[in-house]
Image (cartoon, rainbow, N blue to C red):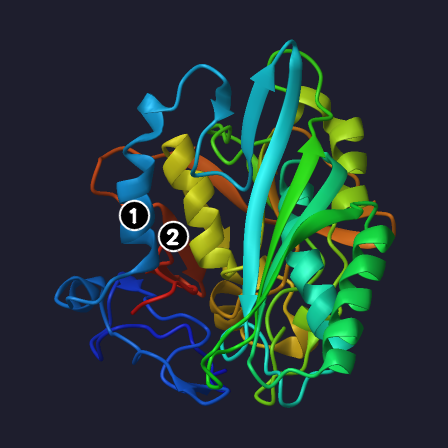
Amino acid sequence: MCGEVCGCVGGSEPATVSPLSCGGRCGGVVWGVTTSRCFSSNADLHKLTLMREFDLLKNIFAHNQSLGDAVVIPPGDDMAELTWSGRNLLVAVDQIVDGRHINLSTTPLELVGRKAIARSVSDIAAMAAKPVASLAAVVLPKNFQTQQAQTLSKAMIESAREFECPLIGGDLAFHNDPAHPLICSVTVLAEPMGKGEAQSITRSGAKTGDAVYITGQLGGAIQIDGSGKHLTFSPRVKEAQLLLSKLGSHLHAMIDISDGLGRDVSHIAELSNVQIHLDAAAIPCTNGLPWQNALSDGEDYELCFTTDRDPPSTLAGLPVTEVGRVEERANADDPYVLVHDAGQTHIGDESGWQHES
């Protein structure tokens, strides 16, 4: 995890608009895994031949039209939604990998198991849905001991129960390679709670004129030693349900912040075909960190949403802060996210985390 401010502004010359292109895990070592360098412009990124997460995902999304009528929400949102016999079901899968999402050498297995469940349940919060159940597929390292496996499984079972998303099954395997890391993959099932035709809150509903809000504080969720909020956060399921009950159909779009505010709010903007303007001074940052950390660090698992109504100032005691607005995206090549800070405007689309080979 990079210990520096990772919202780099490209170029040394004064500019009206400058790119924020690096993620919060840039240019450093994440638990022994050297990550990619910090680039000074978006153009630098496209010069590379690396496999990038979101480029690969776009290839997958290109097949969405062929999925059939039973798929109400295809790949591209926090959860997919299926319908049959008048019932709707939301489904999502996520994983944690030792050396990428957690540091097994310094992190108690109780917290490893908790995070494995919590980060998948956070997708349920993003859809303002009700948890139903979860399943886990775990690949254990060759030298993993019985007591370690029991501790991990107990933590996952207890965390799933805590989040009202009981663990009902899964799969377990030991890898033959002693160097292979621990991998925990968790699938969650949920029930939409909205009323009417659009029962789920998606990323694609933001409207021009909406205000942009976040819950809690952002930045610094992962410390250099691998500790931090990312291991102990609670998915904002109850807060999201309360928000839906207060705003109803005026809750237009929502996402949970896992890759950094810049990257994640750009998903809302892209799928909604709008441009989002963020006020850097309004973003609540953990322990007074610079706003660049809020955009780039990730692993906060707070909610970001848009609405044309005033939401509650708190949700179950959690502060809600207005951080921006939704405007028309006039041209196809315009940025999706602009960050305004002290008279300067920065491009925020690429500020955040994505996997690269």
Label 2: how many Cα within 10 Å (few below 14, some 14–19, many 20+): many
| 104 over 43 or under it: above or below | below
Q: What residue is drawn where x is 76% and y is 66%?
A: 153
Q: What residue is drawn where x is 63% and y is 36%?
A: 127
Label 1: how many Cα within 10 Å (few below 14, some 14–19, many 20+): many
Residue projecting furthest to the left: 47
Gap between marks 2 and 1 measured at Cα: 7 Å
Residue 338's tag is: 2
Q: Amino acid at mark 1?
A: Pro
Image coords of residue 268 (percent x, y): 46, 40
Q: Is residue 48 left or right of residue 263?
A: left
| 40 over 137 or under it: above or below | below
Q: Is residue 304 left or right of residue 272?
A: right
Q: Are marks 2 and 1 in contact (CB under 8 Å)?
A: yes
| Residue at disc 1, secondary structure | loop
Using the image as rendered, state which of residue 251 and residue 184 is in the foreground.
184
Q: Is residue 77 visible?
A: yes
Read off the residue under disc 1.
335
Q: Which quadrant of the view contains residue 263? A: bottom left
Q: Is residue 305 left or right of residue 41?
A: right
Q: Amino acid at mark 2?
A: Leu
Q: What residue is drawn where x is 34% and y is 57%?
A: 53
Using the image as rendered, state which of residue 284 and residue 94 is in the foreground.
94
| 67 over 97 or under it: above or below | above
